[in-house]
Every structure is written in C-alpha cells, then in structure tokens.
Amino acid sequence: MPTATGHKTIYEEALEAGLTRRDFLKLASAITLALGLDLKEMPKVVRAMETKERVPVIWLEFQSCSGCGESFIRSMQPRMEKVLFDLISLEYTELIMAGAGSAAEEHRKKIMAEYPGKYVLVVEGSVPAPEYLFIGGHSAYDILRETAEKAMAVVSFGSCSSWGGIPAAKPNPTGAKAAADLVKGKPVIRIPGCPPIAEVMTNTIAHIVIFGQIPELDELGRPKEFFRHRLHDKCQRRAYFDAGLFAESFDDEGARQGYCLYKLGCRGPTTYNACAELRWNGGLSWPVQSGHPCIGCSEPNFWDQGPFYERLAMIPGTQTTVNPEKVGAILTGVVVAGIAAHAAATVVLRGRIAKHEKAETAAKEE
Ligand code: SF4
Ligand code: SF4
C-alpha cells in the first residue's frame, strides 16, 4: 500500500527491484543487527520498511579527496547497495551520479522542492571562503546554506566536514571551515574520521529511516553508540600498555610481539572512534592491529597535532605527556591498593619495568 504521500513503501520498491519476501526478511534482519537491536525487535524494522518510503538523500562534496565517499561505498554491514537501493534514494552525489551540469543541479533543486523537511543532506569535505569554490556558478557556502535549509537533518561525513580537516590545516589558505559549524537551525550529526567508518554512516541512515529520528548524539554531535569509547579502551594491545611493554621501532622485537605502539606515536588514548570494535574491511583488521599507531584522524585538529610518529598523546586526567615507563607502575599501584592478591604479579611487573628503564638508560648513554 502506498504511503500517505502516494509514494511506494521501501518493501514495495524492494519487490519491484526483484527481491523475494525471503530476501527482504534477510535484509531486515541485517539492518536489525546493524542497529544494535535484538532479533526479537525485527518485526519493528519489518513494519517500518513495509509502511515507510525511502528517504531521499542529497550528498554534497566540497573540499574533499572523495575518500569518505569511497569508504562509504565499501560498507559491508549492511551492504552499501542495500542501503542505497532499499532504504534511501540517493538523488544527488557528485562521486557516482551519471548526470552532470545544469541537469544535475536542477534535479537537486527538484528534490528540495518535492521533499521539504524530508530529505537528508550529507556533506563531505570542508567549506572554503566564498571566493574559492563554485559549483554551477554558486559558491559552496551558498549551496550548503540553500540545501541545508529544507533538509530534515544534516550529516557531516568525515573529519573535513565535521571539524575542517586537512584543508583547514595551518595556515588554512582557503579559510576552510567545518560544514557542521556553518549549518544553523538543523540537527547536525558529525561522523568524523579520515575516512570515517562506512558502517557508522549506514547505521545512522538506517536509524533515521527506521525510527524517523536521528540517533542519540554525544556532546560533540557524534552518534554515541560509535564514539563513546577511546580506542585505547578496546585495543588488543592494551595489556602490553598496562604492563609497560612498548615497541620502540617499527621493526624491533616488541613490534613483532605485538607490544603497545604508544611510544611510536599512537593517539589511541585520546581518540574516540569505533575502529577497534567494528574494524575495517568488513571487520578484518584496523590500523593498530596491523602494526600502525592511531593518528587520531577522527579528533578535531588531528592534522595539526603532529609529528605523527612521536609519543605525544596525553592520557586524559593528566596535563602533560605521560612517561610510558611509569604507566605500568601507576596502573599497577591502583590495582595493588585494592587487590592484595595481585602483589606477586606486581613485583614481576615492576621488575620488568625497571629492566626496561635500565635498558633504555643504557641505550641513551651509549
Ligand atoms: S596506546 Fe595505542 S597501541 Fe597502545 S594500547 Fe593504547 S590504543 Fe593500543
Ligand atoms: S585507528 Fe585512529 S587514525 Fe586509524 S582510522 Fe581509526 S581513528 Fe583514524
């Protein structure tokens, strides 16, 4: 049955695209899981898809390398084509649309007129001062303002759109600004990352379509579900950090043993993102697992927080850079105060840290 506005429902569109009822239910279960719901909640998702229409999406791209869009089209869960064709109607996107020139611009305006307050605007890239970037004779700033005005919500996809990103790095020659900071009077969801994790975007879109509202956000406007943990808290190298065992170079024995990468510049202790939980490439791995320190790409101003391979991250709660040789000792001290049974292990641990410090001092003296 068509929706109140006379459009086909998501279910009807899916059948028309050749999906069977069985395919449709499989898709609904994938979306239920991607939304973090129990499968018992699947009837709600099915009901929403049987009664709601696809959400039109306009995807604007400004000062960007297109990496965010590339990341999105490699979403695995739910698969991007399912999101595109079954949940949303991607009406305008410079990266993959076939149309171009005035026809494409007219289509963007047509969607804005036909779906006021009902389409989602995704913005990739930062926005330069008005004189630097024109599309179809209009400045990036004017296009953003005009398209955001009638949107239901705006998604700032990627660190450039969320915080200004690399185009805004010092000395910021084009006066680049975060799109999220320029949009007024609309809900803005920031999904930072360089690039951002595709599954966070598909989940956010699925949430908007299924529940008709934006997901819960943290104080910086990021979906809470994906940005509530520091990478450091979910990292598989964390036990080595706590034990004071660090790789000193990319090819030493510590690196081979999978030791903590903090001394090689890892920003995991100050970076909020879901890389350690969702991982990349369909859950295969993530940079720290693969041996590269996190550079904090989802944090504001990460591009000006270099050099990337020097130990710089601060552990929250301290105002200075932490001495990693002391970390194990500090953490151990806390544990010992409460759990006397760990005393023996602590002696071993302190011995290991002392040995490590001695070796480092000797190396410096040489
Ligand atoms: S500093 Fe980096 S490598 Fe070490 S535990 Fe934290 S996130 Fe993992
Ligand atoms: S591990 Fe760090 S730098 Fe790498 S993608 Fe995740 S947040 Fe960005």
Image (cartoon, rainbow, N blue to C red):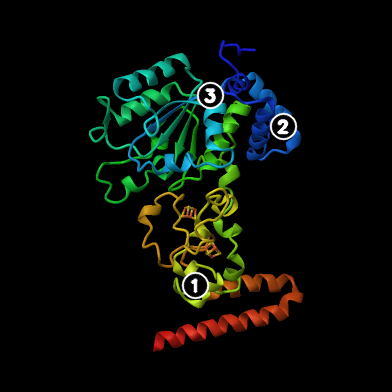
User: Residue 112, located in which quarter of the rendered image?
Assistant: top left
Q: Which residue is mark 1?
A: 323
- Helix, strand or loop at mark 3: strand
Residue 200 in sight here? yes
Residue 162 in sight here? no
Asked whether, in this view, residue 227 is left or right of residue 28, the answer is left
Report how far apart the C-alphas of labels 2 and 1 lie in the structure.
49 Å
Is ligand 1 closer than 8 angstroms to the Cβ of mark 1?
Answer: no
Q: Residue at x 28, y 41 (%)?
A: 175
- Label 3 or label 2, whichever comes before in sequence order: 2
Q: Position of residue 295 (x, y in %)?
A: 44, 58
Q: In this rendered view, identify the residue nearer to me: 15 or 10.
A: 15
Question: Few, some or many C-alpha atoms within 10 Å of disc 3 (few <14, some 14-19, many ≥20)?
Answer: many
Q: In this rendered view, identify the residue nearer to me: 332 or 86.
A: 86
Q: Which residue is mark 2?
A: 42
Check disc 1 and give the amino acid type: Asn
- Label 2 or label 1, whichever comes before in sequence order: 2
Q: Residue at x 27, y 25 (%)?
A: 136
The C terminus sits in image quarter: bottom left
- Asked if marks 3 and 2 touch (Cβ < 8 Å), the reply is no
Check disc 3 and give the amino acid type: Val
Q: Which residue is mark 3?
A: 55
Report how far apart the C-alphas of labels 1 and 3 lie in the structure.
50 Å
